[in-house]
Amino acid sequence: MQDNAITGILYVAFGLVALVTLGKNDVPNIRQHPDNSAVRVAVALNAPDDGPTQADGTYPAILAYNEVGDYIGWSDWQHRPHIKSGGFHDVIIEQQKGPGQQATYLQLFAGTDAVCIAYISQTWADGTTRGWLGDMGRACGRPYYYSHIFVGNDGHVPDCIWMDADHSDDPDHDMPAALQIHMQEYTNLTTAYSRDPAHYCDEECIIFHRDPTKHLDFKKHPPKEDRLFRGNHPPGGPCCMDDDDGYAKRNRQRQQPRNRRPPALAARLVSSPHGKHSATDLCGSELSHGPDFVSWSERVFCDMGTKVSWPLCGSGGSVGGEEGEGECYEWETHSLVTGGRKVARHYATVEEWG
């Protein structure tokens, strides 16, 4: 394995192309055969079927391809580990069909528990490292949430992208069930990389699929033969969730923000002191999805079910743009103070990020 690996990872945030430099602690740390590669997946949040107090989520199944699109390897599909919320796990890619080759394309297939991926990194057989940040989900118009994972030498805190195979945690069916990422496209090898944010959502870089897994049995072995996803958009367009005729039309015509959440997320509250984590922005985004949120830097509470933000009690401010209502969120009792009374929010889990 390569020591002290440093790789520049490109991502898009607020309409601009930015760069994070990965360090040795951000890449897989697992012994691998010289013919194989390794992949790390880090998650911010999980939304399991068996209740909000359990924070485990199934590691995505992975297929790997070389630069010309040849299928070269896979992860262990029968023993897919669980990743704790806010944690990561490293797995080996068995490259039996392409020993020692560079796994420049990865396909990730979600399990039936929704998971929010903050970053992916890999170490190729030759020790080269690559990475991808969950910020690209929001940049490419996919459901996202904040993460509490620090990446890179400058402590970047990426957003995370939601994935869900059966859409049980995804009433609007907006989450991809699979991602195909051309890892090479997100690496700053020279100063000549594209400054066009749209490029990094193009199908040559990434493809999102809502239901690509009908021919795959994740309880058995990886397929003997497989191929890269092919996009259905012209160059320059985001790819490719509208794999049925009605999806894109529904997505364009949605007039109200999503407000349906599974019980596991509705019974959970997250708070963060990070200046990047704006509760106001989270509530104002149609793409955001996840638990209710408190920003300590703003002193604002976001009700993610209704997409309405409330000032914390004692902070001043107003609700919904109306001055002088005196309505607020009381952190100590986890209650909304409205109309002179307290309405308790019955959270099963309160997660305070540091």
Image (tube, helix red, strand yellow):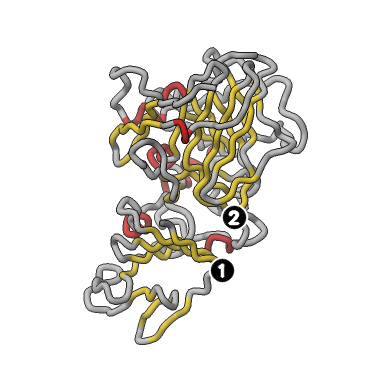
7 vs 341, nearest the viewer: 7
Q: Residues within 10 Å of mark 2 (few under 14, many from 20)?
A: some
In the rendered image, which quarter is residue 66 located in? top right
Q: Which residue is mark 2?
A: 55
Residue 253 vs 1, above or below: the answer is below
Q: CA distance from mark 2 to mark 1?
A: 12 Å
Please state which amino acid type lies under the numbered disc 2.
Ala
249 vs 40, nearest the viewer: 40
Q: Going by the image, does 206 lie left or right of 93?
A: left
Q: Is residue 174 visible?
A: no
Q: Which residue is mark 1?
A: 348
Q: Residue at x 66, y 41 (%)?
A: 81
Q: Is residue 222 visible?
A: yes
Q: Residue at x 63, y 61 (%)?
A: 51
Q: Look at the image and tell me in which quarter the N terminus lies.
A: top right
Give the x, y percent position of residue 291.
Answer: 48, 60
Residue 193 vs 268, above or below: the answer is above
